[in-house]
Image: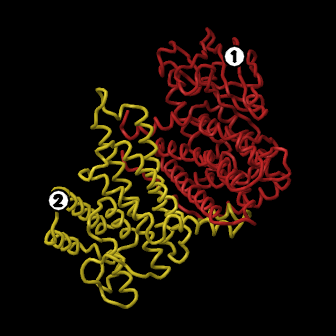
Amino acid sequence: MQDVSTLLLDSTQRLLSDLSERNASRTADAADLSADWHQIEEMGLPLAFVDEAHGGLGLDQKTAFELVRMCGRHVLAHPIVETMLANHFSVTAGGALCDGPVHSLGKLTRMQQELAALARAMQMAGALETILAMTISHVEERSQFGRPIAKFQAVQHSLALLASEVAAATAAADHAVGRFEEDADTATLAIGIARARIGEACSKVSALAHQLHGAIGYTREHRLHHFTTAVWKWRDEFGTQSWWTRRVGQMVLANGRGEFWPMVTSA
Amino acid sequence: MTKIIFPAPVESEAAEQLRADVRAFLNDALADRTPLQRAESWSGFDRDFSRAIGQRGWLGMTWPKEYGGGERSTFERYVVVEETLAAGAPVAAHWFADRQSGPTLLRYGTEAQKHAILPRIVAGECVFCVGMSEPDVGSDLAATRTRAERQGDGSWKVNGTKLWTTYAHESDYMILFCRTSGGPADRHKGTSQLLVDMKQTEGVSVRPIIDLMGRHHFNEVHFEDAVLPADALLGEEGQGWAQVMGELAFERSGPERFLSSIQLLTELIGALQDSKGAAAEAAIGRLFAHLVTLRHMSRGVAALLEAGENPGIHSAIVKDLGAAFEQDLPDIARSLVDEEPDLQSTSNFAAVLAYTMMAAPVFSLRGGTREILRGIIARQLGLR
């Protein structure tokens, strides 16, 4: 990755951490949110998918998707990813850059929907990473029966399973982004695979994380719910998990028994 | 460590050309093999097949040419391994040697052993078995009781019993993990690996253990004052634990941990051809998504191995998720297709379903139980 990208990723990481910490310790009003958004725009985040000719950052897709993953790691109230997508759709259709945050993308073409679905996959992978890190911290800090609950084998095995699901989600998202970068026109299957696999990981990871956090994780005060409720929403957007999963199944069944394995190795 | 990344493998034209060659070869070589036979996966044993694979240069592919190897990449070997598994080829006559015994010999064997044995593995003519488990020693491998004592002339006298030794009755050699000093209380200290010639050594007896399907793969191998030559010691005396962990890393890292039931998924897709519906689409889509993701992760393990890194947690994750995926398959198949599982059935689906259902319990036992793997993952996450 080039130096410019590394710098951008580092400073984005810092900005998003600052914003999420700030918002954890206050009830943000309209003025706060508007100040936050100003910082997000200054960083150029809404232009991640816009080329330089249209006033964008001209990032390679890998870097742009890394920014999307970061947005998933820090679930904020701001529609950063939606605005990234809206700007991209607008300029590629010959329109102008959007003015301010975009909350809803409206009706999308098939190609637009696939990009948006892939972005959600990356956001989910990012959010799941944070849920894993939060859960590890929690089980190491929380003591019961005179020792950290991380020392109990039942807890260790649940956490191992949680980490495995997160690793699978990350692998599925990375694979789909790789296929999309190679050729966006033929990435439908890889995106569907990512959405099917990550959607399932979201269910398992959320259930395990809430179980391991105990009752405190079910409170409004604790930040776990920002992440679990976010992935419950994202996994069914731009095509529900069920819709994407069936789509993959339809493609496999249409090819039939003889083409099944070649399809695996080329997916 | 909270972020677990599986690196993307480097795609190469050489590997894809090789894939086409392997497919064409398997298509001919396995033309008469029924789906039920293919479902045996890496339990199927056929010396002629292993010799034919060896003749094509598809064994010991990554080893130095000096010992008959091909000096090819980890990815090229991966292609051969996954294509043979997907086709349901009978690989057991070369599988253990190519996967773990050969690499262990390459690292710890004497020059004489390497020159004598590795070219025979490469030719598909040398069968190995794995001497780890014992009657009272399963997951707790460090508690090994089998003992090798050094004699005055430098030779080793072995006493003890190994268990679940797959294809010991067909094997030319075993790599034996045992105690060479101290007692079980010394745990990892005082263990070593020794090379056992299964055909020439007196005092070694092999007794069959029949599995729940009535098959004979497992054995009990009994050593009674069996004498091994001085140069049977592999690597360093007392370093057996570190060496056997290295061997297990090879044993756990491959795609056989999620591809051994691929025949059932293939037959399920066939059985659903005329009865597609929402439930079938959802189930097949889900399974396909799991399979492709597991494969992507597994190729990441190959990339880590190629880069000389230790993929301990990565291998454990792929094996644990892979076993769960395979063990779910029979019930999913049963829920979608209205056919009684039956090994004798003329329906390929019914026969393969019966076979896989009965093979499934062992998927999360062999090569490291689910509980051991989750312990490894938790340790790597810093919890233990």
Q: Secondary structure at mark 2?
A: helix
Foreground mark, 1 or 2, reads: 2
Task: Chain A: give its colour.
Answer: yellow
Evaluate whether residue B64 shows in this view. Answer: no
Q: Which mark is residue A65?
A: none
Question: Looking at the image, which residue is at 61% across and 59% down?
Answer: B283
Q: CA distance from mark 1 to mark 2?
A: 69 Å
Asked if B106 appears above or below A2 in the picture, the reply is above
Q: Amino acid at mark 1?
A: Phe
Q: Quadrant of the C terminus of chain B?
A: top left
Which residue corresponds to the image point at 19% horizontal and 60% vertical from the top-left? Answer: A23
- Which colour style is shown? by chain
Q: Is residue A150 left or right of residue A31?
A: right
Q: Are marks 1 and 2 in contact (CB under 8 Å)?
A: no
Host chain of mark 2: A
Q: Which mark is residue B223?
A: 1
Instruction: Give amino acid for label 2.
Output: Arg
Q: Tell me where residue A163 appears, x and y as whole percent.
A: 43, 47
Q: Which residue is mark 2?
A: A22
Q: Colour of chain B?
A: red
Q: Looking at the rendering, which quadrant does residue B43 occupy?
A: top right
Q: Is residue A211 above or below residue A176?
A: above
Q: Position of residue A200 (x, y in %)?
A: 49, 56
A204, B196: nearer the viewer: A204
Residue, far top: B152
Residue beneath the point at 50% across and 72% down: A182
Host chain of mark 1: B
Q: Is A186 rendered above or below residue B159?
A: below
Q: Foreground residue, B133 or A206?
A: A206
